Image: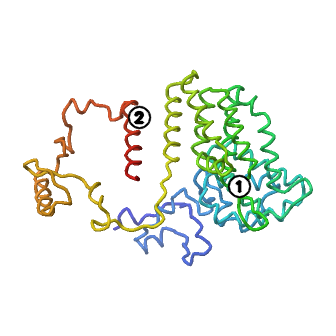
Amino acid sequence: MSDGFDRAPEQPRLLRAPSNSQDKIPPQNSESAMAKPQVVVAPVLMSKLSANAPEFYPSGYSSHYTESYEDGCDDYPTLSEYVQDFLNHLTEQPGSFETEIEQFAETLNGWVTTDDALQELVELIYQQATSIPNFSYMGARLCNYLSHHLTISPQSGNFRQLLLQRCRTEYEVKDQAAKGDELTRKRFHAFVLFLGELYLNLEIKGTNGQVTRADILQVGLRELLNALFYNPMDDNLICAVKLLKLTGSVLEDAWKEKGKNDMEEIIQRIENVVLDANCSRDVKQMLLKLVELRSSNWGRVHATSTYREATPENDPNYFMNEPTFYTSDGVPFTAADPDYQEKYQELLEREDFFPDYEENGTDLSGAGDSYLDDIDDEMDPEIEEAYEKFCLESERKRKQ
């Protein structure tokens, strides 16, 4: 007597075992199935899956980078395909820059041996940096690395010189681009931000080993800002704000070293735009916030040269920034009070009785007062502006 599990299908479809497998699947027939009733592999043998099926890769996965660039450019028929593939890879995985850039540069040194090849390389990187918004910073880093590690230096110019020449071609049509149609302005803005990244990342090494920035880019950025402010359309002004947030502190420091007041002129121009230009309210608010950012030294905080941990003994203002607490009777106390520990412990014990309530009495786990629920979490622009000014003023007083 047999049960339903000991009957093998009449003509099962067998799967070929992997080549490295030590277990062989013997042909099945009814007699062997009767002799071995535990044929639990019968459902597997009927599977439509094939051991010879190609490997599965998620969409967007590139098998070229499973082992970095160990094979160099052997799998690429042209320089353009090799470089473009690497640029796309950096766009998707910017964290791989440090581990793969050296091999990439070595491969280029074996491939880029003519003026035309170098020109093509420059153009590919420029197009990627100005057409992919997320690649402007990475493109500038890549340009800096290649400018120091590419060995080819033809009479037409090395990598950095050809790159700056390519940027100059776009720079010379800045006035027309700033007043062009929407698509033209969009390309122009991408170029402006890429040039800003180049100014911050492209290092020029002097004969004595000192590292400086390219002064020609500093001059170019000043003129690009003029072109943007001379044509105060919303997108031009937004681009100017982005550029100044990116490079403003570095530009101002460089101008001050040369005794120039260019940043003062730019800020004055911004204030005139806010008063006179027909830009949107949101853009005007962006410009005003930029002015406030600059007034706070671009958000930079300079630490004192000699650091010493503040204590009640060496800092008379030690308790000034301490919070103020209140007892159950409404009596205020701070960490400076002699019985601070006792009062603070009492406060903690009192709060333990109401673990689900905030300080204002609103239940944390459920809805609070219907009136409070209807209040918008965002501050009114005027209140927000006043709050920011208050914070800046408080920060200045604290540093005095």
Contact? badges 2 and 1 (CB < 8 Å): no
Q: Residue 176 sits in which quadrant?
A: top right
Q: SS at mark 2?
A: helix
User: Which residue ends up furthest to the left in the rendered image?
Assistant: 329
- Residue closer to the observer: 223 or 44: 223
Q: Which residue is mark 2?
A: 385
Q: Which quadrant of the rendered structure holds the N terminus? A: bottom left
Residue type (three-letter) at the residue carrying disc 1: Arg
Say if 215 sits above or below 281 in the image.
below
Q: Residue 27 sits in which quadrant?
A: bottom right
Total labels drawn: 2
Q: Which residue is mark 1?
A: 213
User: Local crowd at mark 1 within 10 Å, few (<14), some, or many (≥20)?
Assistant: some
Residue located at (46% from left, 62% from top): 304
Q: Position of residue 231 (x, y in %)?
A: 67, 26
58 displayed left or right of 317: right
Q: SS at mark 1?
A: strand
Q: Position of residue 221 (x, y in %)?
A: 69, 42
Q: Residue 150 sits in which quadrant?
A: bottom right
75 displayed left or right of 28: right
336 displayed left or right of 39: left
Q: Report, in whole angstroms, how far the alpha carbon at label 2 lies from the one at label 1.
A: 36 Å
Residue type (three-letter) at the residue carrying disc 2: Glu
Residue located at (81% from left, 56% from top): 159
The mark nearer the N terminus, 2 or 1, is: 1
